[in-house]
Image: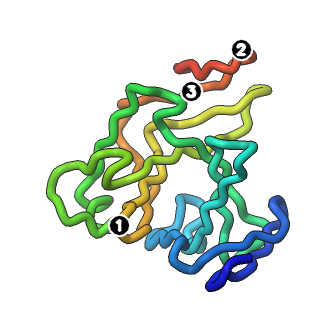
Amino acid sequence: MTTGSAVLTSRYLGQIAWKAESELFLPLGLPGFEAERRMAPVEIPAQRPLVFLQSMDHPEVCFVALPAGTISPDFCLRLTQDDKAALLLEDAHDPVIGVGVLCLVLLLPGEGSLQANLDAPIVINLRNLRCVQSVMEPLNGYFRLHEDGQWRRIC
């Protein structure tokens, strides 16, 4: 453990060393998990590009996500004015993914595989670590992971 770090306990990941400056803040929580406002992003090198979003307050709450571009290289982000306000974005234009924001997509078990809704990404402002789950109008679609390891759009 490095200086300035603390230990967080996760039901699924065990003991996690984390630094306060890496804590994600979700001012609105997540739909269905509105009380979850503080998350620790956890990357396990052997499982990259997976990102685990571990609740800072509830050890039993942990979400599994992937960067949106790993599922669909054509991913397009359209933030609402409310999303931009919650993220405290300074520019009126949509931010650039990988420069101003990171977009993660939650993975959900379903139909014997994993599914991901690219129209509901977790958007992280990289400058202040504020996050929202942006529920966009249908644009990117819903994807399923197939046996060959490829993500394909589903209706």
Q: Residue furthest bottom?
A: 4
- In the rendered image, which residue does mark 3 sit on? 143
Residue nearer the viewer, 154 or 100:
100
**Pair 3/1: label in front:** 1
Is residue 86 shown above or below 137? below
Q: Residue furthest top?
A: 148
Please tell me which residue is depicted at 43% across the width and 27% down the height of the picture: 73
Q: Amino acid at mark 2?
A: Asp
Q: Which circle marks residue 148 in the picture? A: 2
SS of the residue under disc 3: strand
SS of the residue under disc 2: loop
Q: Amino acid at mark 3?
A: Phe
**Pair 3/2: label in front:** 2
- Check contact, mark 3 vs mark 2: CB within 8 A: no
- Give the x, y percent position of residue 101: 37, 53
Q: Is residue 100 left or right of residue 130?
A: left
Q: CA distance from mark 1 to mark 2?
A: 37 Å
SS of the residue under disc 1: loop
- Please identify the quarter of the rendering in which residue 97 is found: top left
Is residue 84 shown above or below 1? above
- Check contact, mark 1 vs mark 2: CB within 8 A: no
